[in-house]
Image: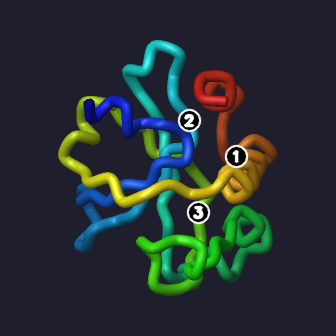
Amino acid sequence: MFEKLISKGAVFAGKFKGIDHEKYFIIVGITKDVISCCSVYINSNIPDFIQKSSALLSLQVNILGRKYNFLTHDSFVSCIEIKEHKVSDLQKCRFIGKIDEEDLKNIITTLINSDTLTEKEKQKYF
C-alpha cells in the first residue's frame, strides 16, 4: 500500500543524517523498476551560500505556501542536486501531500536544464 504513495509530485516528511530537523521533500523521479527514486528538498529560506551564486540561485524554484496545506509560507525547492532513495527506505517517512502539475513540471525542467546533474542521473529518472 505504501508503494502506491510513491509517485512524482508526492511530498514526504522525514529525518535525514546530518540534518537536525524533519525535512520536506518531493519525489521528482522514479526508476523504471520502481526500486529507487529521487527527490529534492523544500527549504523555508535560501541559504546564504546559494544567494551569493547566481548559478545556484537560478536552481531554486519558488512554491507558494497558500497552494499547499502542508506549507505555512512560501518556500523554495532546491534543484541543485537530487537525493536518491530506495523506495523501501521511505517507509520511515510520512506522506504529507502532493504538489500540482505546474510546480512539478517547473521543478523537473529546472533539474533537467541544470548543469549540476549528470546525464546518467537525468536518463535514469527523467
Marks 2 and 3: which is nearer the front? 2
Q: Amino acid at mark 1?
A: Ile
* 2 or 1: tag closer to the N-terminus: 2
Q: Residue at x 41, y 36 (%)?
A: 6
Mark 1 and mark 3 in contact? Answer it, CB < 8 Å.
no
* 1 or 3: tag closer to the N-terminus: 3
Q: Nearer the viewer, residue 74 or 56?
A: 74
Q: Residue 16: give x, y in percent of width and height.
A: 27, 56
Which quarter of the image is occupied by the C terminus? top right
Q: Residue 108: give x, y in percent of width and height.
A: 70, 46
How many marks can you see?
3
Secondary structure state at the residue bearing disc 2: strand
Q: Is residue 42 above or below residue 5?
A: below
Q: Residue at x 71, y 62 (%)?
A: 59
Mark 2 and mark 1 in contact? Answer it, CB < 8 Å.
yes
- The residue indicated by pointer 2 is 29
* 2 or 3: tag closer to the N-terminus: 2
Q: Is residue 82 above or below residue 48?
A: above
- The residue indicated by pointer 1 is 108
Q: Nearer the viewer, residue 80 or 44?
A: 44
Measure the alpha-carbon separation of dots 2 and 1.
9 Å
Left or right: 79, with 44 as reference point: right
Q: How is the image coloured?
A: rainbow
| Displayed quadrant of residue 51 | bottom right
Which quarter of the image is occupied by the N terminus? top left
Q: Is residue 12 above or below residue 4?
A: below
Q: Amino acid at mark 2?
A: Gly
Using the image, tell me which numbered label, if any, was put on residue 78: 3
Q: Amino acid at mark 3?
A: Ser
Measure the alpha-carbon separation of dots 1 and 3.
11 Å
